[in-house]
Image (tube, rainbow, N blue to C red):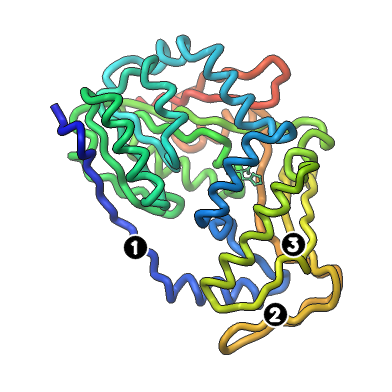
Amino acid sequence: MPDSKSPRFIQTWLADVEAERVAARNALLATPASVAPKFFYDRLGSHLFEAITELPEYYPTRTEATIFASHGTDMAKAIGAGMALIDLGAGNCAKAARLFPLLEPRRYLAVDISVEFLREALRELQRDHPHVHIAGLGQDFSTKLDIAADLLGDDRPVFFYPGSSIGNFTPDEALGFLRRVRERASGGGLLIGVDLVKPRAVLEAAYDDALGVTAAFNRNALLNLNRLIGSDFVPSQWRHVAFFDAAKSRIEMHLEASEALAVAWPGGDRRFAAGERIHTENSCKYAASDFADLLVRAGFDAPTRWTDPAGWFAVFWAPAR
Ligand code: AVI
């Protein structure tokens, strides 16, 4: 039995801070300028995201939870027993922990770029589930997925990627990511949550809430960037913009200069005209059948899907023989 006090923890990813600085400066100097969405998630940003998931307008987290609550037993039947559950972007591990009684994993591997959050969550989980082999892996899994075989033992690899985080990739990037998961999922599969296309007003309210929490989350990326590259962004000078681009089937988030502005950092600067935007995030919304096709193109077997009564969100089980 694993030692209940110390889940195994491995960090294979260490930020190359200088490379991140160069990439961030180049993105600011490009036309249009952009800030990578990973800059949302410093400590404050992670808390702001948790607050977003509680907002009345932000339906994805709540809707996905109702799908797991209504169909969890069927999911467990479809997935089968004896698995190593691999949680991609595990965060506080709460979503996976709620599935433990249904899926009864023999092993649980939590993967996240944010290692501090993970360590604490895993210690608690191990305390509550002393019979499960629990391990943490600090890794930026968006570009490569590097899982040592001994972390999974002989158990079937079942990947878990909830919350429609797949929507933050473009469809081409999503296909590449799903292919990398498929290569490692033989004998198991992928359980994934995906946000679906719905009326524009519902989508746009979810990304531009009345309390301004999403606006704060968006602007916080500028504070994070100030710390990383020494820039002098003043968040209050930037307007939060979120809209649904129907042709690209995605929400886009931007920050818009409220007046002509200059932003400087050691060794560089950039002027922004009034109304000029910095692109900060895409959140793609799928038709359920299109996402099922994407899974098959990535090499999975025909998926099973469960949705809420309104058809706003879907959870797919994509087996990998
Ligand atoms: C993490 N990701 C799935 C969220 C989304 O809905 O695309 C991030 C987010 N951005 C604004 N609100 C929430």
Q: Return the residue found at the far bottom.
A: 267
Is there any visible trace of residue 292 in the rendered image? yes
The mark nearer the N terminus, 2 or 3, is 3
> Which residue is painted at 66% across and 59% down in the image?
280
* Quarter of the image where one finds residue 181: top left
Residue 9 placed where, x, y %?
25, 46
Residue 233 placed where, x, y %?
68, 73
Residues at circles 2 and 1 in contact by the CB criterion of under 8 Å: no
Q: Which residue is mark 1?
A: 14
Along the line of sight, the residue nearer the viewer: 251 or 317: 251
Along the line of sight, the residue nearer the viewer: 60 or 194: 60
Label 2 crowd (10 A; few <14 / some 14-19 / many >=20) = some
**Which numbered circle lies on residue 263?**
2
Q: Which residue is mark 3?
A: 255
- Check the picture and name the quadrant holding the C terminus: top left
The mark nearer the N terminus, 2 or 1, is 1
> Which residue is painted at 45% across and 31% down in the image?
94
Is there any visible trace of residue 157 in the rendered image? no
Three-letter code for the amino acid on which mark 2 is drawn: Val
Three-letter code for the amino acid on which mark 3 is drawn: Leu
Q: Within the displayed image, which quadrant is ligand 1 positioned in?
A: top right
